[in-house]
Amino acid sequence: MLIRMSKAKKYSCIHCGEPFEVYPPDDEHPRSSRDKPKETEVVGRIIEMTFDCRNPECLKPNTLYWYRPKMYIAVG
């Protein structure tokens, strides 16, 4: 059995700048963004995940959107 290990993505809290690492929810949603992508730009569904800042002086939420981008092939 092959187990694929997803790589961590590094972000910082939008409120205080505290760095944190997040992992994709699964292999079908490899990309993440702070801005919600348009439905026309993704394949499948978008997963919204909220992470609370671990800085005790902040503790505010940070939302990321996980998705698989559409691939476009130029023909010409």
Image (cartoon, helix red, strand yellow):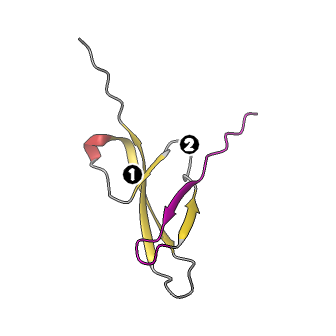
Q: Quadrant of the C terminus?
A: top left
> Does 67 appear above or below 21?
above
> Regarding mark 1 in the picture, which secondary structure is present there?
strand
Residue 73, given in percent of the width and then of the height, sits at: 32, 22
Q: Nearer the viewer, residue 54 or 17?
A: 17
Q: Is residue 70 left or right of residue 1?
A: left
Q: State the residue at coordinates (76%, 33%).
A: 1
Q: Nearer the viewer, residue 54 or 28?
A: 54
- Residue type (three-letter) at the residue carrying disc 1: Ile
> What is the residue that sits farthest to the front in this orientation?
17
Which residue position is annotated with label 2? 27
Indicate which disc, 1 or 2, sits on the residue closer to the N terminus.
2
Q: Residues within 10 Å of mark 1 (few under 14, many from 20)?
A: some
Q: State the residue at coordinates (31%, 51%).
A: 37
> What is the residue that sits farthest to the right in this orientation?
1
> What is the residue that sits farthest to the top in this orientation?
76
Residue 27, given in percent of the width and then of the height, sits at: 56, 42
> What is the residue that sits farthest to the bottom in this orientation?
57
Q: State the residue at coordinates (54%, 52%).
A: 24
Residue 64, given in percent of the width and then of the height, sits at: 43, 61
- Residue type (three-letter) at the residue carrying disc 2: Asp
Q: Is residue 1 left or right of residue 9?
A: right
Q: Is residue 32 left or right of residue 74?
A: right
> Regarding mark 2 in the picture, which secondary structure is present there?
loop
Q: Which residues are magenta?
A: 1-17
Which residue position is annotated with label 1? 46
